[in-house]
Amino acid sequence: MTATAPAPSTARARVTAFLPRLALVLAALLAALFTAASPATAHAALTASDPTDGAVVATAPAQVTLSFSEQVAMGDDSIRVLDPQGKRVDTGELRDMCSGNTVRYGTALHTGLPNGTYTVAWQAVSADSHPISGAFTFSIGAPSATDVSLPTAQAGGGPVGIAYGIARYAAYAGFTVLVGGAAFILLCWRRGAAERPLQKLVVRAWVTLTAATLAMLVLRTPYTGSGSFSDVFDLDGLRAVLETKTGASLVSRLLLLGAAALFVAVLFGVYARRVAGLGPDEAGRSDGADESEPADEAEGPDDTSDLTFGLAIGGAVVAGGIAATWALSEHASTGIQPGIAMPADILHLMAVAMWLGGLAALLVALHKVPGIERAAVRRFSRVAFVSVLVLAVTGVYQSWRQLGSWSALTDTDYGQLLLLKVGLVAVLLGIAYVSRRWTARLVEAPTDAEAAVASVPAVAAVRQSSDDVSRETASGAVSEGSDVSRETEPVAVPADPERAAQLARQRAARESALEKRVRDADPDRAGLRRSVLAEAAIAVILLAVTTVLTGTEPGRTVEREAGRGSTATAVPDRAVKITLPFDTGGPNGKGSVRLELDPGRVGANTLHLWSESADGTPFDLPEIKVAFTLPAKDIGPLPLVPERAAPGHWTASGVQLPLTGEWRIDVTVRTSDIDQTTVQKTVKIG
């Protein structure tokens, strides 16, 4: 009995019928992810504590509470209170005291605590998935010596933080190449689906993204907790991670990668066989019409059009779903306008993948596949142009949303990284312009690779030498100058395995040389390869900066935490305490000023100022001045020059605030004869 394979049209029909169903399922999953996402507000910052940092209380408090600017995730061990000897004095039970827009957590203290200085260390996970931590001290009765030192290491740092950062970068790179490589094949060069170098590129990108996602999932517990690699085996911790928004996003990404594996299998299976079976004319129509082709040659039936459409729809849904796993768990899901920010972030990630991932696919094709047509390069140029437009629009929106002010662009790490990213994009666009000029000069590659080889004498000589080695390998005993017919030589393996291996290495070397000669036969194509290689190098750096940017606290949050552009409310009979970072721009010009206005009410107040340098040591400024202004009543500025009480400490008594309202406090600091700056904060009195 003769086995008959199913007709190609039948296989294609099955695949085409399955892809819309896959698209519907993935669209439903994506909609469920959006529905389940609880829009939080921003990268959280500690806004207040009770007792406050450095406070001296008469009696032992019953509990310690922490207030945050935005929602955070905390556990029973997130707040620890230590006595002067380093012994824990809290009960270890977390109290959720959140109400409305107030985000407050606390822990109870044991009774009968003696006088002395106590240390509060806390750690949490903000709504955008990044761990945050801090520590401060307060004293009961009077300050005392303590054996506890404030921790300097930040949450999410150390070797575990480095490993998690590498996995994060690998995930972005894998997603970029996976989506961009597949899009390059479907939109620019469909016959590339049958080329092994492009197949390897896309498959390796899928493996990289899958492995990086698994690594992030198992590293999540130590990354947000102890920082010890041994916690990757903590099953309870892993179970807790799966209940978080980040854990759900990582699991969803793994499920979507399963669908992506099916997409890749169809692309390099049924679809690759289909496009490989097309003739040169059909293949040209399959890849689309170039501007220089006559209209009638670009028209006609396309045996892969329906399959291409199905793959494009299914691939777009899968890629959008994977991109959503980032948008739903990181910066886009927090802050202002999350309903707009998340779709914008998905478009941004997709545009990055289409541009940079397609660039990687083009580079591989130019280096490994000498027969790529000029039309494919020109089509990628158009795809890249559209991607850059989408990047510009979504990037401007994201920058406005995460920065909040022009000062954050230069005064925060986030803004400085953003400027670096913009500079790299500008360089990348400049090199892309050069690549576009090479594309315009590119000579159309022959469709028959053998014709290209024959047109170059040096390459033909290499092919002849390669044929000689092949004949020697085939016959096993043919000497130089033998008259044995080349067409009728039997295929055999040399009896000596070492000789066979040697001949195989020689044949591989000659084939590699042949491939290089074919690539270098067209000088315009060689110039395009060099410019695309330069683009790819810049793209690698750009992707690294983007990865760091996603893990950096947004500028809007940094300024809120520092007190710029926000209003602090004075609590009755409790001192107003604010911290104002400054940078005069000169040598050693960075530091911060802590201001305390006691009791922080209408009438007479006492003012204390402490100045610290960037390393936390007292900063004895040459001059510091303060002014109070009530803009609503057109009062002020009321200038004040405090007296120096100690190195880095100034005081002033009898500071009169005549009316209630939102008072603006301007602090002018001078670090040298010519370097000075003014920082400000608005405080609500009454």
Image: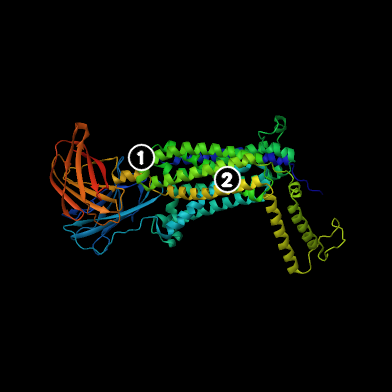
> Element under label 1?
loop
Q: Quadrant of residue 493?
A: bottom right
- The reply to whether dot 2 and dot 1 touch (C-beta < 8 Å) is no
Judge by depth and name the residue closer to the eye, 7 or 365. Answer: 365
> Element under label 2?
helix
Q: Looking at the image, is 663 positioned above or below residue 529? A: above
Could you say where residue 628 lies in the image, as x and y percent from the top left? 19, 40
Tag of residue 571: none
Could you say where residue 644 lies in the image, as x and y percent from the top left? 16, 52
Q: How packed is label 1: few (under 14 Cα within 10 Å), some, or many (20 or more)?
A: few
The residue drawn where x is 31% and y is 43% is 560
Residue 71 visible to an observer of this rendering: no
Could you say where residue 476 lies in the image, as x and y percent from the top left? 81, 65
Mark 2 residue type: Leu
Q: Looking at the image, is 178 positioned above or below residue 141? A: above
Marks 2 and 1, Cα distance to the nearest angstrom?
33 Å
Q: What is the residue that sits farthest to the top in this orientation?
A: 295
Q: How many marks?
A: 2
Residue 585 visible to an observer of this rendering: yes
Q: Which residue is mark 2?
A: 359
In the rendered image, the quadrant that contains the C terminus is: top left
Color style of the picture: rainbow
Q: How packed is label 2: few (under 14 Cα within 10 Å), some, or many (20 or more)?
A: many
Judge from the rendering whether residue 276 lies leftward or rightward of residue 248; answer left or right. Answer: right
Judge from the rendering whether residue 257 lies leftward or rightward of residue 494; answer left or right. Answer: left
Could you say where residue 681 lies in the image, as x and y percent from the top left? 25, 42
Q: Which residue is mark 1?
A: 406
Q: Quadrant of residue 654?
A: top left
2 or 1: tag closer to the N-terminus: 2
Mark 1 residue type: Trp
Judge from the rendering whether residue 251 lies leftward or rightward of residue 452; answer left or right. Answer: left
Judge by depth and name the residue closer to the eye, 378 or 182. Answer: 378
